[in-house]
Amino acid sequence: MTFGPILKRAFYNRPAIEVARGLLGKVLVHGPTAGIIVETEAYLGGDDLASHSARGVTDRTRVIFGPPGHAYVYLIYGMYECLNLVAEPDGQAGCVLIRALKPVAGLDIMRRRRPAARKPEDLASGPGKLTLALAITRAHNGADVTRGPLVVRAPAEPRAIDIETTPRIGISKCADWPLRFLIRRP
């Protein structure tokens, strides 16, 4: 399968909300596996108490405050890893959680990694599922997503998409903020 060019650092060097919306329809690629990004959530610095960066720079959050275009991968519930992409200029906190993908390459590999998935659309239908399907782990924390085996590419043929905006899900703080974006299904 062919994809467009890898997104440049400038794509990520803007407000997290813009990056979250802009990532929809792009292709997350890790080695032989890939999926179209269909759902994201923006996490802001400062007053966004749902963001890991709300308490400032720590060893865990340092990457969120670093240069844009890097992966922030963390463990939730002691068992699932989640992939975020760092946005905002260097020194400012902001990132985008990749919530769901539509698998487009390496489906056989993804099925081996996610044997419980019954249908292709279930392979990467949540943040923990997509990291399992694409073999993204905390070892990728800090990885530069503008080069290397873990990247985001433009689609080979860009298409217009209709974006739905909702409150974020699965959080308790600032949960009513409309920072979840997904491609509206026809």
Image: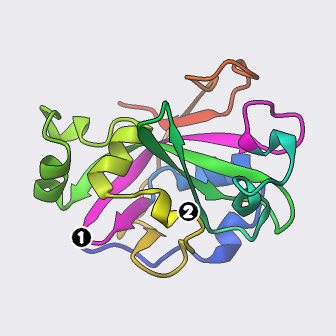
Q: Is residue 78 magenta?
A: no
Q: Which residue is mark 2?
A: 141
For label 2, the SS is loop
Look at label 2 and name its amino acid. Answer: Asn
In the figure, is residue 24 to the left or right of 9? left
Above or below: residue 72 compared with residue 145:
above
* Relative depth, front residue between 172 and 104: 172
Residue 100 in sight in this render = yes
Pointers 1 and 2 in contact (CB under 8 A)?
Answer: no
Q: Which one is earlier in the sequence, the residue at label 1 or at label 2?
A: 1
Residue 121 image point, x, y percent: 23, 38
In the figure, is residue 83 to the left or right of 158? right
| Location of residue 136 by image quarter | bottom left
Above or below: residue 125 compared with residue 81:
above
Above or below: residue 28 compared with residue 184:
below
In the figure, is residue 138 to the left or right of 42? left
Q: Residues within 10 Å of mark 2 (few under 14, many from 20)?
A: some
Residue 106 image point, x, y percent: 18, 61
Q: Is residue 47 magenta?
A: yes
Residue 158 image point, x, y percent: 42, 62
Residue 163 in sight in this render = no
Above or below: residue 169 compared with residue 39:
above
Q: Quadrant of the C terminus?
A: top left
Which one is in front in this view, the residue at disc 1 or the one at disc 2?
Answer: 2
Q: Which residue is mark 1?
A: 32
Q: Residues within 10 Å of mark 1 (few under 14, many from 20)?
A: few
* Relative depth, front residue between 139 and 101: 139
Look at label 1 and name its amino acid. Answer: Pro
Magenta-colored span: 27-52
> What whole-number distance in Å separates the C-alpha atoms at marks 1 and 2?
19 Å
Name the residue located 77 percent from the left edge and 61 percent from the top edge. Answer: 14
